Image: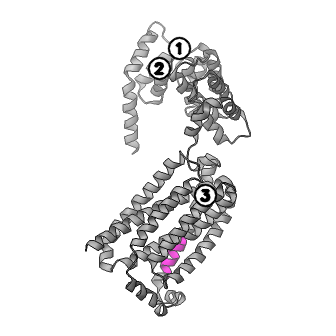
Amino acid sequence: MERQAVSERTAALAAGLLIAQQVAVKVVRDGFYLSQFAVSTLPAAVSAGAVLSLAAVVLLSRRTGRVPPARLLAGMLWASAALLVAEWALSLVAPRLAAAALYAHVAVLGTTAVSGFWAMVNEAFDPHAARRAMGRIGTGASVGGVLGAALTWRASKLVPTPALLLGVAALVALCALCVRRLAPPAARAEQTAGDDGARASVVRIFAEAPYLRSLAALVALCALLEALLDYTLSAAAVARLGRGEALVGDLVPALRRAASHCTGQLVDALFDDRVDPVVRRRIPRVLASVTTQRAVDGLCAGLDCDRLDVRYRCAQALVRLRKRGGTPIASDAMFRVAAREIGGLSGSGVRLAHVFAVLSLALDGEPIDLAFRALQGRDPTLRGTALEYLDHVLPPAIRGALWPILGADSAVDLAARRSRDEVREELSRSSWRFSAEGRARGSAGA
């Protein structure tokens, strides 16, 4: 009984490690491949991988009849770990070849390793013990999937994508050690090997078992859907994130550490139309960590970019820099930018948020932010207070252009209106209501 409990824990640990490395290696495979090849080549790669996977499954089914599944799976895992190390070494000199080799490697040994694991579990436990063990093994696999994704995400922020292959190789090696402990005794292994002659052919089994035919059709359909989703999501990731390291991790933290030494190059890339738009959107986040006038000037110039997404990111970076202090920003220039942006406004949205971000650079930032949040809410009293404050601080030209978009009345009762300080104080006192209203909207949406 004690040995049975140990086997269950070992199998659960092996399942967790196997699924963790499976999740991790697929993330690295897709990120590495799409950093070296265009997404249009992915259908051909998926098709070639499917052919290789089919050949591997046929070979595995034949070997399973001659070799105990635990021993066969352990050998596959050791081979996979060795291949991962070799592919990492190859990536240092021939990254494209390494990316293609990794794709083929995962296609051959990825799904076959999972199939081999469940064949091993079927052999390691009798039917009564298997019912109790499956819950623990399934839990281990689920935890492994979550941890594999989390570890890959965190590690991708610290090391380049190819270097992640070494970490995955370590997971595979640990899994192989666990699997080896689940190998059956020698007598049982010999009995398994001796049963090969009694096994019926695969074709005859499928001909006599409609259930197996239905199960095979279901697996084939799931595989087809997985391939279609894989391509769709990969294409969407490339369209949004671009090619390169951003597909696996975020390079912004690493760039921030070197930004003070290459501010000029970053500013040049910000204005270079040949640079991927995804990269240009990320540059302001990097420059936001550089508290120098050169970085501020570059971001201010970025407010004249022809792309709204780049202008928006530049304004947000300037807001963060201003909160840190020590970097003056010309108010007149910000008012000119705001006037130009208001000319393209047609309602609420990102552009309106951008206008208020720019205005917060020209005026006192905190009350402008509070006024914008009040205008986005549904409380008419808060909206009125926000408009009253804006009426105090905005230049007449800005106010005249912005008022119709905000749905405000241009006629103001000068005798009845309060001082700017009084209105600002009321905005500050009412700030807790913005959070309460946001939580209420979130609860209603849920």
Q: Could you tell me what secondary structure mostly forms the magenta stretch?
A: helix
Rendering coords of residue 374 (x, y %): 45, 26
Numbered circle sitting on residue 239: none
x 46%, y 11%: residue: 420
Q: Mark 3 points at which residue?
A: 88
Give the residue number, with chain letter if any, for mark 2: 367
Relative horizontal placement of residue 166, taking residue 98 as reference (left or right): left
Which mark is on residue 393? 1
Mark 3, other Cα within 10 Å: few <14 / some 14–19 / many ≥20: many
Up the image or down, 90 lies above or below 281; here it is: below
Residue 143 falls in image quadrant: bottom left
Q: What residue type is labelled 3?
A: Trp
Q: Residue at x 50, y 62 (%)?
A: 22
What residue do we see at 68% from left, 27% from top? 304
Q: Nearer the viewer, residue 320 or 401?
A: 320
Among numbered discs 3 and 2, the one appearing first in the sequence:
3
- In the picture, measured across the screen, residue 420 lies left or right of residue 44, that is left
- Disc 2 crowd rating (10 Å Cα; few below 14, some 14-19, many 20+) is many
Q: Which of 306 and 96 is in front in this view?
A: 96
**Residue 346, visible in the rendered structure:** no
Q: What stretch is highlighted in magenta?
A: 213-221
x, y percentage for residue 27?
A: 55, 56
| Mark 2 in CB contact with mark 1 (< 8 angstroms) | yes
Q: Which amino acid does label 2 sit on?
A: Pro
